[in-house]
Every structure is written in structure tokens, then in C-alpha cells.
Image (tube, coloured by chain):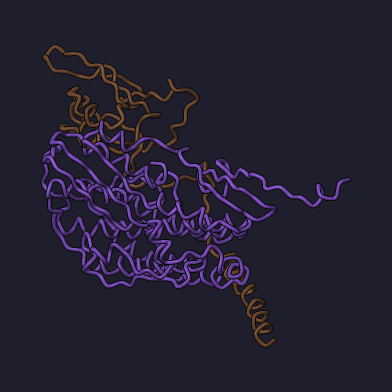
Amino acid sequence: MNQTIINTTEEYFLNMGPQHPSTHGVLRLMLKMDGEVVLEAVPDLGYLHRGFEKIAESRTYSQFLPFTDRLDYVASMANNQAYCMAVEKLLKAEVPPRAEYIRVIMAELNRIASHLVWFGPFAMDLGAITPFLYAFKSREMILDLFESACGQRLTYSYMKIGGVRWDLPEGFIEKTREFCRYFKGQLDDYETLVGGNIIFLERTRGVGALSKEDAIDYGCTGPVLRATGARHDKRKDEPYSVYNEFEFDIPVGKTGDTLDRYRVRLAEMSESLKIIEQALDKLPQGEISAKLPKLIKPEPGEAYTCIETPRGELGFYIVSDGTAKPYRMKIRSSSFSNLSVIPLLCRGLKVSDVVIVLGSIDIVLGDVDR
Amino acid sequence: MIRIIKEIYKALISLPAGMLVTLKYLFGRTVTMQYPEERWILPERFRGRVVLIRDEKTLKHRCTACGNCLRACPNASLRLESAVDQNKKRYPVKFTVDTALCLFCGLCVDSCPFNALKMNKDYELAAASREACVRSLFPDGENDDR
């Protein structure tokens, strides 16, 4: 046989997803491969596109609330909060302090639950099944708390424009305190089980390192940005709700690699616990909702609010033309921006590392496609 | 050389440490539930299928077929056919919810001025066809006896 033919290798195309368990949803990655090494990775989106921005134009302001649950379905409380805050800004409505505190408690509990959904499957991407079970066991406790407060385990619709829909149920505060105590021990277990494991460390250290400049250029927010060392958190930088009344730290990483993203998220969970405990101590009595008309008709104008969800900055931009329905709604989702660094991070990696990097970015396809 | 030995030592320690954690849970309480033999205790506020409430005193449905819930529904999952009784009061004849469209948000319950709706604890709503997803709001499929 001709010697040149034997020695020539060709670049080839590898299709990963949309039905791939490690893409965490319906994401398709088109990989250009040279042997085992990825030369180029291009995400292909749109498999979960439901057109929520357009749907919003044909729904009244209160009717759109259940749809926000389905954006980032792992952290629905945060979506509810961001949307309600945007409409409240349009209406210039004041939210009662008790409602704000309840919102913060719920949002932070949801942050822990969301990070647990990330933590378990991330360990599973690396081949460890046990942490997944422990993470979901703790998450179930949070979901039980949510279920007692609003009757649902995933699509809460707990907040409403002007406050929250129901007051905290009986025994909620005690159960939340109990969970906080329990979860502190759990975090130590996770650290021993995963964070101290030599296989985990070797697989993640230095993989998919993202520089601070690149992270800012690509519009990354949340733990992906903070892992690079940028101390940017909406809860501290532009305190919304009642976050300025709590003491908590913003964990940051150094190198921006997969291990740093892991550490930042685990540290964030314990910071969230701090916030929850302070909020439970300070929880004021009073109204849970502002007095607003049944049919909400804001003045013509526009409003943009953004909050820090577990995945980063979630923004709602609403234009009102004075009718009961929004004229235009734009949703700025963190997962979408964070996903855009995938082509940059995956260059030169092996396929098994692509899985880890994608997992560490923590995307929710409902949030990416909207 | 010393560094390598240190790393090997660390690795040898870290694996049994993780195993100890799992061993701790091995003798812990079971958390899994043998569904469907065992069931959850659902909280008061559980949002299942929406149904009409029958008034305890008059034994009639409180619904006046005003249609507020239909307007509040974000996904148009409710269908209502009404009639007028001898006292010239409107009442629902046929009231259905399409559980395939329903978002289980509870906005219909919130919008009802007569507190005639509630969400029950029915969560096993899988059906074999789209037609079977359309369920009556009258409890147990009965009709108003007016």
C-alpha cells in the first residue's frame, strides 16, 4: 500500500447530543476532532425553544408568571423573583418587608437546591454515582419545604407581583432551621467524598481554564465568572431586595478552571445557609403583598431588572405600552451567555474533558433556549 | 521525589476517607420510598387538578359561571358551558380542564370571587390519549343537580 495514505489522518466530525446524557438536556455539540483531541466545538441550540418572549406579548402581566417557572426550571424561585421585580419597577410598587424576606429565604434555598442539582450530575459526569444520591437526598428536603409553602416541587409560581402568594406555612421556620443544621454536616461529607478525592482533583485541576478577561468579554456571570477571580455578584454590587441587610461573602476562585468552579459553588452553598439563617432571625411580621389592582396596567415605559440566580445574572427587560399586556419582553439568561464560552474552553481538550467542562458551566437548556 | 511520595500518600488516604462516608450512610435510615405501595403525605397547599367546591350547607356548587377563571388562565385550559336556572342564576353545566394544557399554577383559584374552585391532591394525571386528558371539574364526574 502507498506509504503516504497510511500516515495521513483526517479530521473528522463528531456529533454529541442532542440525546446525550452528559449534555444535561437537549444541547447538541458539533465537534471537529483530530483523533482524540477536539479542534473545534460548536453548540447547536434551539431544541427546547418555546418562544417565551413572544408568548409574553399575548399574556397579561400576572398570567406570564407561571411561564417564568419554566425558563430555568431548576431555580424557578429566582425566575419568579426577577420577573416580579421587573413588573414592580414598572408599577413603582413597594413590596412589604416580610414579603422581601420570604423571597430572599426562598431564593437562597433554591440556590442550594440548584447547586445540588449541579453537584450530583457533575460528579456523575466524572463517573461517581454516590454523590448524586446524597445531593438529591438533601435537595428533596428543600423541595419538601417548597411544597409545603406553595404546593409544587418544581414549578413554584410562589411569588406574585407585589409580594408572595401565600404566607409561610406553620412549622416552616423550624424545619428550615433544622435543614440548615443538617446541611452543614452534609457539606463536609461532600468535601470528603468529592472535593478531597484524588481522582476528582486530577480530572478537574487545570481543565477548561478561563481567564478573567475572556469571561468578561463573553458576558459570563455567576460562578463561572467568579471562579476566574472577578468579585462580581449582583447581591453585593447592586443589592436588590433586602440583601444589603445580610452579612455574607462572595467566594471567588483563582485560575477559573473546573476545580475552581466546583469550589466556588460549594462555598456559595454555605454562604446561602448564612443568609437563610440571618433572614429567619430577622423575619418581620406584617403584610405579605402590596395592594395592587387585579388587572395590572403599568404606565407606558420600560424597566430592566437583573438578579443573581444560581447560574448568574438573569434580567427581564419589559416595555409597556399602557395596556394589560407587555409590548415587548426580553429575557437575558445567564446560561446562554455562559454557554458561549464552550468553543473557547473546549479547544484542545479530549471528549471526556468536554463533558466535564460542559458540566462545570452548569447550563439549563430551558434557560438557554427560552 | 518527596513530593511524589506525599501525593501517593494523600491519594491513598483520600479514597478510604470517601468510602468511610458511604459506610456511614450504609447503616443510616432508608430514605427511598416504595412507590406506589407507599405514598407521600401531601401538604395542605398541594396544587393538583382543579375541581369545584360543593358548598357544605346548600350542597350546591358555588360556581356562578362568571368566567373569571377562564380569563385568568394563562394557557386557556378551561372550558365552560353554562345555563340559567329557574331563579335566573347562571350555573355550570359542563366544566372541563385540559390537564395537558394546565400549568397547575392556581391562578384560576386565586381569581375566583366566590371561592368556588380548589386544587385537589390528584397528581396521577397520565392518560393514554389527548381526549382523556380533558377532565371534568365536578368532583367524581357528577353534574350539578339543578
Q: Which chain is purple?
A: A
Q: Identify the residue at image location x=33%, y=66%.
A: A232
- Residue extending farthest to the bottom is B2
As rendered, which of A24 and A17 lies closer to the eye? Answer: A17
Q: Identify the residue at image location x=43%, y=68%.
A: A228
- Residue extending farthest to the right is A1
Horizontal arrangement in the rendering, residue A3 relative to residue A29 (left or right): right
Q: Identify the residue at image location x=52%, y=56%.
A: A359
Q: Position of residue A75 (x, y in %)?
A: 37, 52
As rendered, which of A314 and A287 lies closer to the eye? Answer: A314
As rendered, which of B88 and A341 lies closer to the eye? Answer: A341
Horizontal arrangement in the rendering, residue A279 relative to residue A266 (left or right): left
Query: Against B121, is A351 above or below?
Result: below
Q: Position of residue A301 (x, y in %)?
A: 14, 43
Q: Position of residue A235 (x, y in %)?
A: 28, 63
Is residue A1 among what the camera can see? yes
Is residue B31 among what the camera can see? no
Query: Against A197, is A324 above or below?
Result: above
Q: Which chain is brown?
A: B
Q: Quadrant of residue B104?
A: top left
